Amino acid sequence: MLKTRRHLLGATALALTLGPVLSVHAADAPLVLGFSQVGAESEWRTANTASIKDAAKQAGITLKFADAQQKQENQVKAIRSFIAQKVDVIAFSPVVESGWDTVLREAKNAKIPVILTDRAVNVTDPSLYVTFIGSDFVEEGRKAGRWVLDWAKKTVPQGEVNIVELQGTVGSAPAIDRKKGFEEIIKADPRIKIVRSQSGDFTRAKGKEVMEAFLKAKDKKIHLLYAHNDDMAIGAIQAIEEAGLKPVKDIAIVSIDGVRGAFEAMVAGKLNVTIECNPLLGPQLMQLAKDVKAGKTLPKRITTEEGVFTADVAAQELPKRKY
Ligand code: GZL
């Protein structure tokens, strides 16, 4: 009995001696964060990337950043590379909702916590990620739908109201949820119908191309375009003008993000309204990475607050915009 106590005392003394040294060393080493970004497909994404890189510098966090060029296989490769490099925390904005279980289980087995930013995932085991920080895309779709209900009553008092829809990237959380929220609201007015809907992949070029096809169809009068992001709306504006029509006057346009280009389009009288989707998640992400590393318990979902900006306030708001 006496021997055991002596050993215990020895071990405790050793731990006390080394403990502060170990903790001081651990506290000094900068946190290493591996971040896999969707790509550079839109003004929103560019602002999101800038926010993450700037915030990592400000926070003294070593950032390993990988651009996936909108390809899931590149994100999986990047996450595996972060695991091999034994980073402290992994964060990513998943390009699509599904297909993440395997690589996230590899991160969990490597005891590397994962934070989701911007877009969510569909996984069988929610313990595969610690928390999600981003927007409520369903609510963004609802906000767009509410504006359309009000606009339709005032602008098309009777008869059918035909809408064309430019969807975001197929299978992505924002595309799925923005459609869901919008349709939930517009069904309150049976005159309002989505007569054509296709993905423009969140880019200006594709948005223009798909809008050209919508306009060529000529089978139904188009009253309004609902675009899942401003970049596709800006591309569609070019298509509308090249077809000899006037954006807003001939075809109303509702989009989402609230990027600078949207405010400039509203000031020019070419866009009716943009629903804000805040890309400036960098500072919150860095704090979350530190909290996760420190073993703090975090809520499973952290949603950002966002507004709705109509053309009549665009000129006064434009100088204040941070992205
Ligand atoms: C939304 C984000 C979307 C933006 C697009 O949080 O995932 O991806 O709405 C971007 O502009 O490409």
Image (cartoon, rainbow, N blue to C red):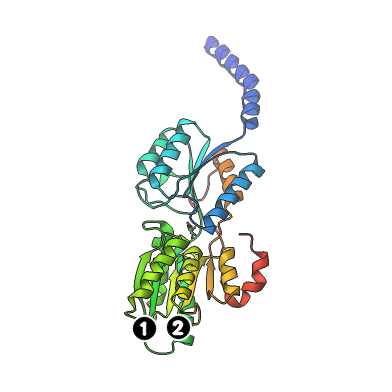
Residue 60 visible? The answer is yes
Residue that protrudes farthest toward the bottom in the picture = 158
Residue 96: x percent and y percent? 39, 52
In the shown orientation, is residue 151 left or right of residue 318?
left
Near-viewer residue (25 or 259):
259
Q: Are marks 2 and 1 in contact (CB under 8 Å)?
A: yes
- The answer to which quarter of the image holds residue 141 is bottom left
Q: Which label belongs to residue 152?
A: 2
Tag 1: amino acid: Arg
Q: CB at mark 1 closer than 8 A to ligand 1?
A: no
Residue 148: x percent and y percent? 46, 78
Q: Which label belongs to residue 191?
A: 1
In the shown orientation, is residue 185 left or right of residue 310?
left
Near-viewer residue (65 or 147):
65
- The answer to which quarter of the image holds residue 186 is bottom left
Q: CA distance from mark 2 to mark 1?
A: 9 Å
The residue sitting at 43% across, 43% down in the picture is 75
The residue sitting at 42% across, 68% down in the picture is 181
178 is higher (above) or lower (below) than 271: above
The residue sitting at 45% across, 31% down in the picture is 84
- Mark 1 Cα-neighbour bin, 10 Å: few <14, some 14–19, many ≥20: some
Residue 303 visible? The answer is no
Q: Which label belongs to residue 56?
A: none
- Mark 2 Cα-neighbour bin, 10 Å: few <14, some 14–19, many ≥20: some
Tag 2: amino acid: Ala
